[in-house]
Image (cartoon, rainbow, N blue to C red):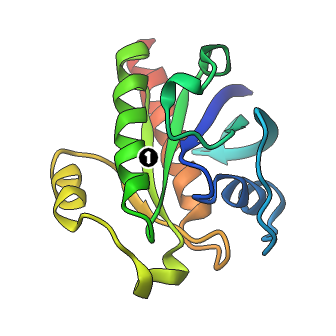
Amino acid sequence: MIRKKVCLLGSFSVGKTSLVQRFVKGVFNEKYLTTLGVKIDKKKITINEIEMEFVIWDLAGEDDFMTVRQSYLRGTSAYLLVVDGTRNETLETALLLHQRMQKENKFLPFVLLINKSDLKAQWDLNVQKIKELKESGWNILETSAKDNEGVEESFQILAMALLENRVQNE
């Protein structure tokens, strides 16, 4: 079995914990739960008949990447950048987090998740910036932990990317 560390990065209250809980336990809780430091969960999945265990690090929301402890990021194999579709500033934070991750750990697979698709009527995002990111090759998914939209798919995309990297590096 392949074991991979996956980090969820993003501002506070974008839905990182809710996404993890939906993926790992299949549940959604309406109550806002602030993550302090890091919460670690595990889930096994099978992709192309290969068993993989994700060790998922749900990091406390930070709007300043410098406050994210570098020790939490060591050994990361892939990451999910989580944005709250109703708060454009969370996209800017995610872009800064991505820059820092790529500087420290070049070529790690990642997916940008625009979360809270159940509130799409209230979205406030820079549509042009999202379009530019898509055109530059970013994997971008709309997700909703509440409605279970795109949650499983986002982790499957990461798993596929990790398997592709593994094959290329062998």
Say whether residue 48 is visible.
yes
On the image, the x and y values in percent for residue 69 come to 63, 20
Q: Is residue 112 above or below residue 19?
A: above
Q: What residue is drawn where x is 77% and y is 64%?
A: 32
Left or right? Give the position of 37 relative to 106.
Answer: right
Q: What residue is drawn where x is 53% and y is 36%?
A: 79
Image quadrant in which the C terminus is located: top left
On the image, the x and y values in percent for residue 88 come to 36, 61
Q: What residue is drawn where x is 37% and y is 53%?
A: 91
Left or right? Give the position of 168 relative to 63.
Answer: left
- Helix or strand or loop: what does disc 1 sit on? strand
Q: Quadrant of residue 33?
A: bottom right
Q: Nearer the viewer, residue 150 or 164?
A: 150
Q: Is residue 157 above or below residue 27?
A: above
Circle 1 sits on which residue? Answer: 111
Q: What is the crowding at mark 1: few (fewer than 14 residues within 10 Å), some, or many (at least 20)?
A: many
Q: Nearer the viewer, residue 161 or 57?
A: 57
Q: Nearer the viewer, residue 27 or 128?
A: 128
Say whether residue 107 is visible.
no
The total of numbered circles placed on residues is 1
On the image, the x and y values in percent for residue 134 come to 23, 54
Q: Is residue 82 above or below residue 53?
A: below
> Which residue in the rendered view is the most extreme toward the bottom?
121
Image quadrant in which the N terminus is located: top right
Q: What residue is drawn where x is 59% and y is 15%?
A: 70
On the image, the x and y values in percent for residue 127 come to 22, 67
Name which residue type carries label 1.
Val
